[in-house]
Image (cartoon, helix red, strand yellow):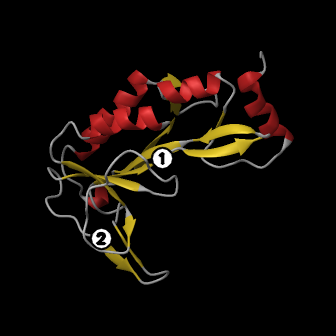
Amino acid sequence: MGRQLHFHMLADDLREFFRIVQDEQQVTITKRDSDIPQVHPFRGSDVDCGDTLCFWNQKFLPHLERKWIAEPGYYRIDSLRLPVLEFMPSFKATWEGKPALGQGRLFGNFEAYLNKPAGFEEWYERLASWIRRQYRKSPLGPGGFVGPEAYEFCRSGGFLLPNIVPPRTQEWLAKIGRQHASK
């Protein structure tokens, strides 16, 4: 079964998390999609919110290459079948005229029929556990966590959104508005 952990991260949160991910010397962070099949390390922590990254632990998979996707025409890492974790960064947005930050996620698929290597799920759990220990629980509800810089962003008036910019309905206005109701 697939497992995911939602979070809100800004640049400093992201840098620290990437440092933790790469503490194991055999881990490469790379873009999932590219115009070339070869995998090259992602440099820096300035991630475009449209980029989905993969965490490739060479302990579980010594060689990784993207496969061609004919429509619409690009190369992609098969994060479903291969023992790689998928990382979607938080995204910046606007909600009711104020700055907002949408949730990112860490995702891994552990279905038994995929025959992923022993230890792969435990690696995911180590990373997810680090987020759970270091971050605060999200005010949006169950399952999400907020990094230290993202938490300060929220405290100073920014809004934390789910993994989409929600429609402007009474329910969403009320739910998101509660983040700053006492201000």
SS for callout 1: loop
State the residue position of label 2: 66
Rendered position, 99 above or below 49: above
The residue at the point 48 percent across, 28 percent down is 147
Inspect this view and state whether residue 89 appears: yes
Classify mark 2: helix, strand or loop: loop
Category of crowding for the residue at label 1, using alpha-carbon neighbours closer than 10 angstroms: few (below 14), some (14–19), many (at least 20): many
Earlier sequence position, callout 1 versus callout 2 = 2
Q: Residue at x 42, y 26 (%)?
A: 132
Percent x, y of residue 134 = 40, 23
Residue 154: percent from left, percent from top: 63, 27
Q: Quadrant of residue 67?
A: bottom left
- The vertical placement of 65 against 25, above or below, is below
Expressed as whole percent of the image width and height from the top left, the position of residue 13 reads: 43, 32
x and y, in percent, of residue 108 in the image: 37, 49
Disc ID at residue 169: none
Report the amino acid beneath label 1: Pro
Residue labelled with disc 1:
89
Task: Tell me what residue is drawn at x 63 percent, y 42 percent.
Answer: 162
In the rendered image of this protein, does residue 132 appear above or below residue 53?
above
Q: Toward which corner of the image does residue 22 lie, by quadrant?
A: top left
Amino acid carrying mark 2 in the image: Arg
